[in-house]
Image (cartoon, rainbow, N blue to C red):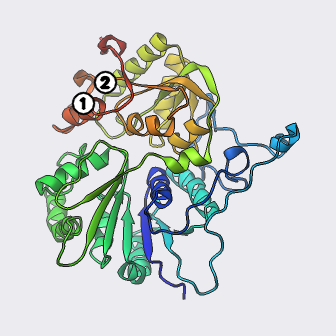
């Protein structure tokens, strides 16, 4: 039987896994020895790892994956320069030793996310951490089987790290937690809403979610209420139980109620990758606001077309949740090269090549890229979402939340309003 890890991390997206690696690397984290220095060329080995796990085809759309060094690429030694020393990660565990950190991947069902997660899992293993791939979706009994498989380790862990406190599956796991410390790492801008809701003592609901489902939906919510309430209590520090709650974040948040906050400045990413080669063009960053029902598709296409013309953009880095149909329409309307990255954008941008200017709508990257690209000369710009773009089904919170994402971004350039005209 595999010994239980003292620290157990649950991730459901590539960005969450990246942020667990950042947390484990940060000073003061008891998750094992910190790796020392970059690997040759600053690029960890990724060869032989399935890159897109059966990702949907984008026939008719010019697309690319970010280039990986080929076996014939000249390394530093080819130019006569001494090769840098390989990274010294935590190294192999002695037989029978308890692993300091085990990362449990609870993959979603969409192929793009699964592909990026497999790539990130390879990076985590390269760093010396144990990664467990645990299917918890896709069939009727998968959640229960996963819960049974994980229950012993969850109860035994002294530190539990979660990437998505809004996840119902994570909340279910939290009912088993006896850990002394609970850590929340970023799942993007959702961390801002998590902090706000826990400060107000509200139930945890995603900012873009609206009520629905009729009577069956209300019955499900009622049945799930005890689980949700237990999760909220777990996220509240308790001196009498000696339970600590830490938030490890790049977002502009303030800890409350005994929580501790540590800033994620992407030190691991900067140590492992880059600095990137800059191109003269502008890169656009896509968003899944259409897919989540917040922004009207036609308005979004008009905004992308306007930004392309105004800034001379040539590439569009697609969000992993953007649909192939939407991306085909964007390519036809704008002539942009559609890039579907196989790693989180923070790593892609740091590895390069990347545009000297990166333009994004309100999203996580306007907070994370300034950290990841510190000192590279890249300008990150953010384009506001005009309230006229919102759909009729968008939540009442959507407008103020998106404005807050933009208003609180550090070291970014705010685009003038005319850069994003509404569709006429």
Tag 2, which secondary structure?
A: loop
Question: Which quadrant is the C terminus positioned in?
Answer: top left
Q: Position of residue 158 (x, y in %)?
A: 37, 77
Give the CA distance from mark 1 to mark 2.
7 Å
Front-lying residue, 205 or 192: 192
Q: Residues within 10 Å of mark 2 (few under 14, many from 20)?
A: many
Residue at image coords 38%, 18%: 302
Residue at image coords 20%, 62%: 258
Front-lying residue, 310 or 140: 310
Asked if 372 appears above or below 215 in the picture, the reply is: above
Image mark for residue 269: none
Asked if 207 appears above or below 243 in the picture, the reply is: above
Asked if 72 appears above or below 278 in the picture, the reply is: below
Quarter of the image for residue 304 reads: top left
Q: Position of residue 390 (x, y in %)?
A: 25, 28
Question: Which quadrant is the N terminus positioned in?
Answer: bottom right
Asked if 4 appears above or below 313 in the picture, the reply is: below
Query: Would you say the residues marked 1 and 2 are in contact, meaning their CB atoms lie under 8 Å apart?
Result: yes
Q: How many marks?
A: 2
Earlier-in-chain disc, 1 versus 2 = 2
> Residue 134 vs residue 86: left or right?
left
Asked if residue 343 shows in the view, the reply is no
Q: Which residue, given by chain and number where applicable, does mark 2 sit on?
A: 384
Front-lying residue, 363 or 142: 363
Quarter of the image for residue 10 reads: bottom left
Q: Position of residue 130 (x, y in %)?
A: 56, 70
Q: Position of residue 374 (x, y in %)?
A: 50, 35
Asked if residue 174 shows in the view, the reply is yes
Q: Residues within 10 Å of mark 1 (few under 14, many from 20)?
A: some
Q: Which residue, given by chain and number where applicable, does mark 1 sit on?
A: 403
> Residue 84 vs residue 92: left or right?
right
Tag 1, which secondary structure?
A: helix
């Amino acid at each position: 039987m595999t010994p239980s890890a003292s620290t157990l991390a649950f991730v459901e997206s590539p960005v969450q896994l990246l942020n667990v690696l950042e947390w484990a690397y940060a000073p003061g984290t008891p998750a094992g020895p910190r790796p020392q220095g970059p690997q040759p060329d600053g690029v960890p080995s990724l060869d032989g790892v399935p890159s897109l796990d059966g990702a949907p085809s984008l026939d008719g759309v010019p697309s690319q994956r970010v280039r990986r060094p080929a076996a014939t690429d000249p390394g530093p030694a080819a130019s006569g320069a001494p090769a840098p020393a390989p990274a010294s990660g935590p190294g192999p565990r002695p037989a029978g030793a308890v692993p300091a950190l085990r990362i449990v991947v609870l993959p979603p069902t969409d192929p793009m996310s699964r592909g990026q997660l497999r790539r990130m899992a390879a990076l985590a293993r390269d760093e010396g951490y144990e990664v467990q791939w645990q299917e918890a979706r896709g069939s009727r009994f998968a959640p229960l089987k996963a819960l049974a498989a994980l229950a012993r380790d969850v109860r035994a862990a002294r530190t539990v790290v979660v990437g998505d406190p809004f996840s119902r599956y994570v909340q279910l796991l939290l009912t088993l937690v006896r850990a002394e410390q609970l850590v929340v790492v970023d799942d993007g801008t959702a961390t801002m809403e998590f902090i706000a809701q826990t400060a107000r003592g509200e139930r945890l609901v995603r900012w873009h979610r609206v009520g629905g489902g009729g009577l069956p939906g209300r019955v499900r919510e009622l049945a799930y209420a005890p689980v949700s309430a237990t999760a909220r209590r777990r996220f509240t520090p308790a001196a009498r139980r000696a339970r600590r709650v830490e938030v490890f974040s790049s977002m502009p948040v303030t800890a409350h109620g005994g929580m501790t906050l540590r800033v994620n400045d992407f030190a691991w990413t900067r140590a492992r990758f880059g600095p990137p080669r800059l191109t003269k063009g502008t890169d656009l960053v896509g968003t899944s606001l259409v897919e989540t029902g917040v922004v009207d598709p036609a308005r979004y296409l008009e905004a992308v077309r306007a930004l392309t013309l105004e800034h001379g953009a040539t590439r569009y880095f697609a969000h992993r949740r953007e649909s192939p149909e939407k991306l085909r329409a964007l390519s036809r309307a704008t002539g942009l090269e559609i890039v579907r990255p196989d790693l989180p954008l923070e790593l892609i941008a740091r590895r390069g090549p990347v545009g000297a200017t990166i333009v994004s709508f309100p999203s996580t990257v306007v907070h994370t890229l300034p950290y990841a690209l510190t000192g590279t000369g890249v300008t990150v710009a953010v384009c506001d979402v005009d309230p006229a773009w919102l759909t009729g089904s968008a939540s009442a919170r959507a407008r103020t939340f998106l404005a807050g994402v933009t208003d609180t971004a550090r070291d970014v350039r705010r685009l003038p309003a005319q850069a994003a005209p509404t569709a006429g």
